[in-house]
Amino acid sequence: MNIVTSEQMRSLLAQAPANPRVVATGNHVPPWALLKVIDEALPEYRLNMLNAPAGISTREGVSHESCFVGVGMRKLPTLHYTPARLSLVPALFRSTMAPDITAVHVSQPINGKVSLGVEINVMVAAIEAVKERGGLLVAQVNKHMPYTYGDGEFPVDLFDAFIEADESIASEHGPAAPDAATAHIGELVAGRVGNGATLQLGIGAVPDATLPGLARRHDLGIWTEMFSDGVLTLDRSGALDDTRPIVASFAFGSQELYDWCHLNSRVIMRRTEITNDPGQIAKQPQMTSINTALQVDLLSQANASRIKARIHSGFGGQTDFIVGALHSRGGQAMMALRSWHPKANVSTIVPMLTEPTTSFQHSAVITEHGVAEVFGHEEKVQARNIIENAAHPDVRESLWEGARELGLA
């Protein structure tokens, strides 16, 4: 295991070509110490990262690339956003986004291997791509990163160099208690989930609010892009089928969650090409996808990506899981959101999207006002259900006017 000093790592990185593309672990566990060394070693470089958090380098000489934009890159003039379903991002590393340097965050070694821990995602493909083209594979090894089983395990001699870091990766803030509206949405969502269903779990107010209802189920499975502390709740309540592995691509949560994941044979972390493959998702029994959006229109088109046409986030895994869930036997794809956006003071249900569409053709749209059945109904019935069962009462008349203009009433 080639552990080097920061100075030695800088010397190694200096061998990279001019303005190299650096693909780095993103989301909630960037390799901060390693990124600092990279920033010191390279006068110019392109930082490619999914859902980059605040704190990444934004100095002159650094440009930014992403297929899912996080707060660290959002609104930057140096951002180059490439639209792509998350399941297809790995293919870009073999074509238009080939890495010169791949920088990852790993666990301490066990039996000659390190693990990517709680952030597998697209980084397996980035590792393979950089090795295939003779680039540099470097890592930050951290005792706080759990060792997880699955696609993120790699022999230590595959890496060109490691630096050591002692950085906590746990979230310091647990989920806030849901307000009345969100709690009701959670109840309505949970009420549609049957025993034996397979869940796509996310992070946020609505997934958290569904947990009390889901904890009363049994034989649930998990096949998801990511999971958080909610899995602990389901596990302790006996709601999970302990004969089925928990399959995910990344995780985010408390130290307790990470301790639970460490060397847990029930948790199998898979690369994005597997977890987000609609064909694999469709094979899961009663696959239940729960997503949210910024806006939904009367055709059940959802915008979850853009505000005033400017990129806010990206497709992520929403499109992958909605398609996969709809093809699953007994599956469903729910779009759950507040009917009114409190900050913008506008309805989230609109006659027709004026922003690009992220996803469409959901099973149902669910707000605090009720459940609007969508899939399998003709478009006029879809529109009526959305207006009468999901939209805020204050805007229903204007939505009916919009429906008539669109020929949906």
Image: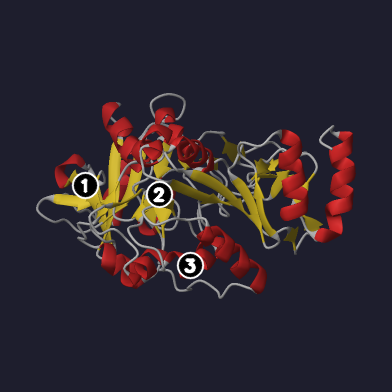
Amino acid found under the numbered disc labelled 1: Glu
Q: Circle 3: is it few (<14), some (14-19), or many (20+) Cα within 10 Å? A: some
Q: Earlier in the sequence, mark 3 or mark 2?
A: 3
> What residue is shown with label 3?
213
* Dot label at residue 153: 1
The amino acid beneath tag 3 is Gly
Q: Which quadrant, please, contains the C terminus?
A: top right
Q: Secondary structure at mark 1?
A: strand
In the rendered image, which residue does mark 2 sit on?
224
- Which residue lies at the image location 63% right of the left edge and 73% below the top edge? 179
Ranked by sequence position, the earlier of labels 1 and 3 is 1
Label 2 or label 1, whichever lies nearer to me, is: 2
Residue 82 occupies quadrant: top right
In the depicted structure, whether residue 381 falls above or below residue 339: above
Dots 2 and 1: beta carbons under 8 Å? Answer: no
Q: Position of residue 90 (x, y in %)?
A: 40, 33
**Secondary element type, mark 2:** loop
Q: Position of residue 178 (x, y in %)?
A: 59, 72
Q: As drawn, which residue projects farthest toward the left?
A: 111
Disc 2 residue type? Thr
Q: Is residue 75 above or below residue 124?
A: below
Kindly report the distance in space between the C-alpha atoms of the residues bearing marks 3 and 2.
19 Å
Asked whether 81 or 226 is in front, the reply is: 226
Nearer-N-terminus badge (2/1): 1
Measured along the vertical axis of the image, is residue 17 above or below residue 112?
above
Residue 64 spot, x, y in % from top left: 54, 42
| Residues tagged 1 and 3 counted as in contact (Cβ below 8 A) | no
Q: Residues within 10 Å of mark 1 (few under 14, many from 20)?
A: many
Name the spot of residue 282 as percent of width and height, x first. 40, 37
